[in-house]
Image (tube, rainbow, N blue to C red):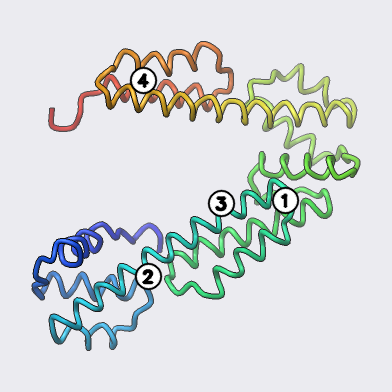
Amino acid sequence: MSDEINWDRIRNLAQRVLERNEPLELSDDARALLLKSAREVAISDQDAEDALRGVPSATTLLREIRQRIRDGSNRLSKAENRVEELQEKGDFNGALHVIRDVLAVEVVPLYREHAEILLDELTGLANVFATGRLNPNLHDRQQLAVLAQRIQRGHALELTDDLRDLLRQTAPTAAISEAETEEALKSPEGAEALMGMILSRFRDAQSRFLRSMYRMTSLRDAGDLEGARQQMRDVLAVEIVPQYRRMAEEQIRGIDSPFPGS
């Protein structure tokens, strides 16, 4: 479903009609757009068709469609931020409650789909947190972060074959060599240190990149393209995590690429 939905046209129509006070013209194209968008925000075809019998009721329909899109987006965004805060504290029950609250009131199928995916993911991570057992369907670093939280809560790290495999798979993404990895995997203490190194390198890399992105964007918007490039060059001078090196290189290429139509 998420691949099929694009609300740009209905947002543009709402902006023209509801904010600029342009008249709503019920052309065949406008009717089709309103009917399709109404369906996407869980308004029945019958209710939408009834509303399309006149301009005032069609305008009310447009307002309701826009409101459902806005409310659902804001609700989900706030929930995701709150879930992240609770996850960092190890409060998975609280995080699950937040998403269940969203699902209790959300009607827009797209937002429900996102919330249900997050609920499934959180349920899996909560089980990892409770048991220490890995789940092959969950993101690698998320599971490492959960295991690190278990250690902080006083649980011993069990160096299972699954965990060894996960660390061997994840260590190269943090620029940790095979030799370093195999040495660390000789003991639970070494594995714990390896896990911490992987997580800290990604945290540092993300923080560094986001700070530089903010400065790069400000400089680029001010017309200082060389200064903008230098922000990413500074990242590349110290960054070792391959993913963030690639991202910095892509940003430099983006600055050097001509704008569309230029």
Q: Return the residue nearer the eye: 66 or 29.
A: 66
Image-based side of 45 in relation to 116, left or right: left
- Which of the numbered marks, if any, corresponds to residue 68? 2
The amino acid type, in three-letter code, at marker 4 is Ile
Circle 1 crowding by C-alpha within 10 Å: few under 14, some 14–19, many from 20: some
Q: Is mark 4 on a helix, strand or loop?
A: helix
- Tell me the SS state at disc 2: helix
- Which is more N-terminal, label 1 or label 3? 3
Residue where numbered disc 4 is placed: 252
Question: Residue at point 55% right, 23% down?
Answer: 242
* Residue 67 as seen in the image, left or right of residue 107: left
Looking at the image, is mark 2 or mark 1 nearer the viewer? 2
* Cα distance in 3D space between marks 2 and 3: 20 Å
Quarter of the image where the N terminus is located: bottom left
Q: Position of residue 204 (x, y in %)?
A: 61, 26
Say which residue label 1 marks.
135
Few, some or many C-alpha atoms within 10 Å of disc 3 (few <14, some 14-19, many ≥20)?
A: few
* Type of the residue with mark 2: Arg
Residue tagged 3: 81
User: Which image quadrant is residue 155 in?
Assistant: top right
